[in-house]
């Protein structure tokens, strides 16, 4: 048969590779910066744009979608062409994908510090960017699927299944999480409120971890590990089980982020069961990777790529062992809201994602420049700095998380809480210092890699179009009837559809009942919509990213009820677009901040926002000076009210026209109460709206007779 | 109009749960049976794909 000559496109791989390095460095620097802010809040420079609440989303988005995202695209564009024995279907689409994705990242880097956010973790980007993501994702998908269609290799290797599964699931996750109604060019409210929003959020959030940080990276592992070790994967059979089980189980596990919350019990249990089952495919995959190296461990000593791969797989194994553990309710009772979660995430982020990204860069760059790595010794130094950095990062944080959580739960023999919240924070500050040292070491290693790769590039010559040869694929009718999966493995579109069905059903089964069955979210008559001023204040709370440090979810534990008040009920959140339950308590829970039990005067909040240490000595909260000066933008109040009405919030008809009158009336009252305490504030300052919101939190049900709801 | 109203109109929505459980159970049983009954050579061939390239 006539052999065809063609060329692999290395330019697009190089572009994504550079983007990976740049966005990795930026994401890590921002991470280190916010890590320092946690124990030294003045590092925020007292500027709105650089406070923790705005930079933390920038860090997470930069690492997940820019660093790991670009790393995945780098590896996919490299391996897909070679596995399909074909150039990417369209160079134009490749470049549209590249520049589109970088523009989205740039958009995120501008909007997030400006406080333009949806307030949903890892989905903070505003609606115009959400639309751009959808378009660019489709561009990528078309190019990928068409390349697979035009391949010269009959069989579709398992790595590509992971790419297909990733593409279809991310599309689904992104679209469902982005159901929102805009009230302005940059602002929107999600379609879901409270419990439903939380369920969608963690279905999305958990699966962002699964389908951005795990499945595509596993695909890369299945290609680059055999390549670097020069031997096939240990068990191909196992890789097939790994793929189907992983995508099937992962999609259900989201509710383990909401244990002991106001989410209905059955949904919580479902999340736990599937999380525990996830251990099997995850460890199957890890063992499959590690066993690929059986008999080749001598190579690991020599080859930097394999060193990084081995630690990456080990971290993957640790994180996926810990994940199911953390989703057990008894463990979660301690770990949740503490730094334990942050440590867990960084074993995955630094160890698994970071190290795989480094490994594939160390592999591809010498290959594409037709040379060898400049210095294996420097790569080895990078490896050790990174590994030690991970340990110094994670161990203190595990300690901090465990210790703080145990301190929260301690009572004196008299039955009083033993520690106030501040004591538990100041106690773990040394651990925060240690963590930032670990992070700095890791970052230093990354700079060493950049130097090493730069020197490698200098000594080689870039092969923009790599020549290859293969026979075209002809439609041959097999002599014997083939098995169904064997046939399926050659049908990318069927595979895509099947993968979609597999993941969609998980989502539907979990979410539909919560949306459908009224008894899942018992309504509480005394819960009323926010006043216009409170609504504006709430939007500022979202804008400043308060949810990155404060939860609004009191779990039914003795210590939490003693510290914060009655545990949270599902029906309390029906007007919360978006929900602000949070996932971390660097500061105390605020669900009942305004209830009589915790009530503080308006002046306290005013002073506290101006300088938290003046009211709470030792506080690590940044100052929010600009809230005192910024004028509240009330021009969008009518639009916001109208969107709320569309979403089912029972404001009276025509209320949008008079909402600002009510807003000013309430603002004047707060300004007057501040004046009594000798604080002069304009009623239209942003701080007034924030105070109104904080004072409202938890007030609705405080006078309700118990039991308030039945949740069966 | 609240989002919930749209989904409520899906008829027979409660069957979905039962259907999906059965579908998945069958899917995995068939997958496993196929995996352990099929010819190992196919897999060996497939698993060598990344190594077939010149680079």
Image: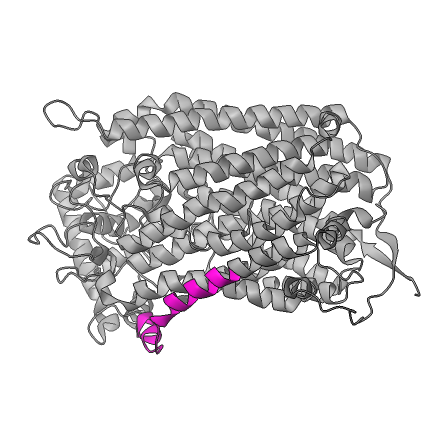
| Front-lying residue, A142 or A674 | A142
Q: Is residue A584 above or below residue A632?
A: above
Q: Tell me which residue sits at (52%, 58%) in the image.
A: B28
Residue A395, image x and y in percent?
A: 46, 25
Q: Tell me which residue sits at (74%, 31%) in the image.
A: A452
User: In which quadrant is the N terminus of chain A drawn?
Assistant: bottom right
| Front-lying residue, A190 or B55 | B55
- B2 inside magenta stretch: yes
The magenta segment? B1-27
Q: Is residue A513 above or below residue A247?
A: below
Q: How many marks?
A: 0
Residue A261, image x and y in percent?
A: 27, 48
Outermost residue toward the front in this view? B37
Q: Mark yes or no: residue A483 visible.
A: yes
In the displayed structure image, the side of residue A481 where residue A659 appears, left or right: left
Residue A270, image x and y in percent?
A: 35, 53
Q: Mark yes or no: residue A40 visible.
A: no
Q: Tell me which residue sits at (35%, 28%) in the image.
A: A402
Outermost residue toward the right in this view? A2
Q: Is residue A151 above or below residue A381?
A: below
Q: Quadrant of residue A155?
A: bottom right
């Amino acid at each position: 048969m006539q052999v065809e000559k063609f060329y692999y496109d290395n330019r697009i791989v190089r572009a994504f590779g550079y983007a990976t390095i740049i966005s990795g460095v930026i994401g890590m620097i921002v991470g280190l910066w916010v890590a320092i802010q946690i124990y030294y809040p003045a590092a925020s420079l007292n500027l709105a744009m650089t406070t923790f609440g705005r930079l933390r989303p920038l860090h997470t988005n930069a690492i997940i979608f820019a660093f790991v995202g670009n790393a995945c695209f780098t590896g996919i564009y490299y391996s897909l062409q070679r596995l399909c024995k074909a150039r990417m279907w369209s160079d134009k689409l490749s470049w549209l994908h590249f520049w589109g994705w970088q523009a989205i990242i740039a958009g995120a880097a501008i909007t997030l510090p400006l406080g333009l956010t949806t307030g949903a973790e890892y989905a903070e980007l505003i609606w115009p960017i959400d639309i751009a993501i959808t378009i660019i994702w489709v561009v990528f998908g078309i190019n990928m699927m068409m390349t697979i269609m035009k391949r010269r290799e009959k069989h579709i290797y398992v790595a590509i299944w992971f790419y297909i599964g990733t593409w279809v699931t991310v599309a689904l996750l992104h679209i469902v999480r982005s159901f929102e109604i805009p009230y302005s060019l940059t602002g929107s409210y999600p379609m879901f409120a409270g419990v439903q929003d939380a369920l969608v959020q963690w279905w999305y959030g958990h699966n962002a971890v699964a389908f951005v940080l795990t499945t595509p990276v596993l695909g890369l592992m299945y290609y680059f590990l055999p390549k670097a070790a020069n031997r096939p994967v240990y068990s191909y059979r196992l890789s097939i089980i790994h793929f189907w089980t992983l995508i099937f189980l992962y999609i259900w596990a989201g509710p383990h982020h909401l244990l002991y919350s106001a989410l209905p019990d059955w949904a919580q249990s479902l999340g736990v069961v599937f999380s525990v089952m996830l251990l099997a495919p995850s460890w199957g995959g890890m063992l499959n990777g590690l066993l690929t190296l059986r008999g080749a461990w001598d190579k690991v000593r020599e080859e930097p790529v394999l060193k990084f791969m081995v630690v990456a797989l080990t971290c993957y194994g640790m994180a996926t062992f810990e994940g199911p553990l953390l989703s057990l309710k008894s463990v979660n009772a301690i770990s949740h809201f503490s730094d334990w979660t942050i440590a867990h995430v960084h074993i995955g982020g630094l160890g698994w994602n970071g190290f795989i990204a480094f490994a594939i860069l160390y592999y591809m760059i010498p290959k594409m420049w037709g040379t060898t790595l400049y210095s294996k010794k420097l790569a080895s130094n990078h490896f050790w700095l990174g590994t030690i950095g991970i340990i110094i990062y994670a161990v203190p944080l595990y300690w901090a998380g465990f210790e703080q959580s145990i301190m929260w739960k301690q009572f004196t023999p008299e039955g009083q809480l033993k520690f106030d919240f501040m004591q538990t924070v100041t106690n773990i500050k040394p651990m925060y210092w240690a963590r930032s040292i670990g992070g700095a070491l890791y970052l230093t290693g990354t700079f060493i890699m950049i130097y090493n790769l730069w020197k490698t590039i200098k000594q080689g010559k870039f092969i923009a179009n790599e020549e290859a040869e293969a026979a075209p694929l002809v439609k041959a009718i097999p002599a014997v009837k083939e098995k169904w999966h064997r046939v399926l493995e050659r049908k990318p579109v069927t595979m895509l559809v099947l993968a979609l069905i597999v993941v969609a059903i998980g989502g539907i089964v979990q979410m539909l009942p919560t949306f459908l069955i009224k008894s899942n979210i018992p309504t509480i008559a005394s819960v009323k919509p926010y006043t216009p001023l409170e609504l504006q204040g709430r939007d500022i709370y979202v804008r400043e990213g308060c949810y990155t440090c404060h939860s609004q979810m009191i779990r039914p534990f003795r210590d939490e009820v003693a510290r914060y008040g009655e545990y949270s009920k599902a029906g309390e959140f029906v007007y919360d677009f978006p929900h602000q339950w949070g996932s971390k308590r660097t500061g105390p829970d605020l669900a009942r901040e305004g209830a009589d039990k915790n009530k503080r005067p308006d002046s306290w909040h005013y002073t506290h926002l101006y300088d938290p240490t003046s009211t709470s000595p030792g506080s690590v909260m940044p100052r929010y000076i600009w809230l005192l000066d910024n004028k509240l933008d009330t021009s969008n109040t009518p639009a916001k009210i109208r969107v709320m009405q569309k979403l089912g919030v029972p404001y009276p008809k025509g209320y949008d026209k008079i909402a600002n009158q009510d807003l000013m009336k309430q603002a004047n009252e707060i300004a007057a109460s501040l004046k009594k305490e000798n604080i002069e504030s304009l009623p239209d300052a942003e701080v007034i709206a924030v105070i109104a919101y904080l004072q409202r939190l938890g007030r609705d049900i405080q006078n309700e007779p118990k039991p308030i709801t039945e949740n069966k | 109009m609240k989002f919930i109203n749209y989904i409520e109109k899906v008829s027979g929505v409660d069957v979905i749960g039962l259907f999906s459980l059965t579908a998945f159970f069958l899917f995995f049983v068939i997958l496993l049976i196929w995996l352990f009954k099929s010819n190992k050579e196919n897999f060996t061939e497939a698993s060598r794909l990344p190594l077939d390239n010149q680079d």
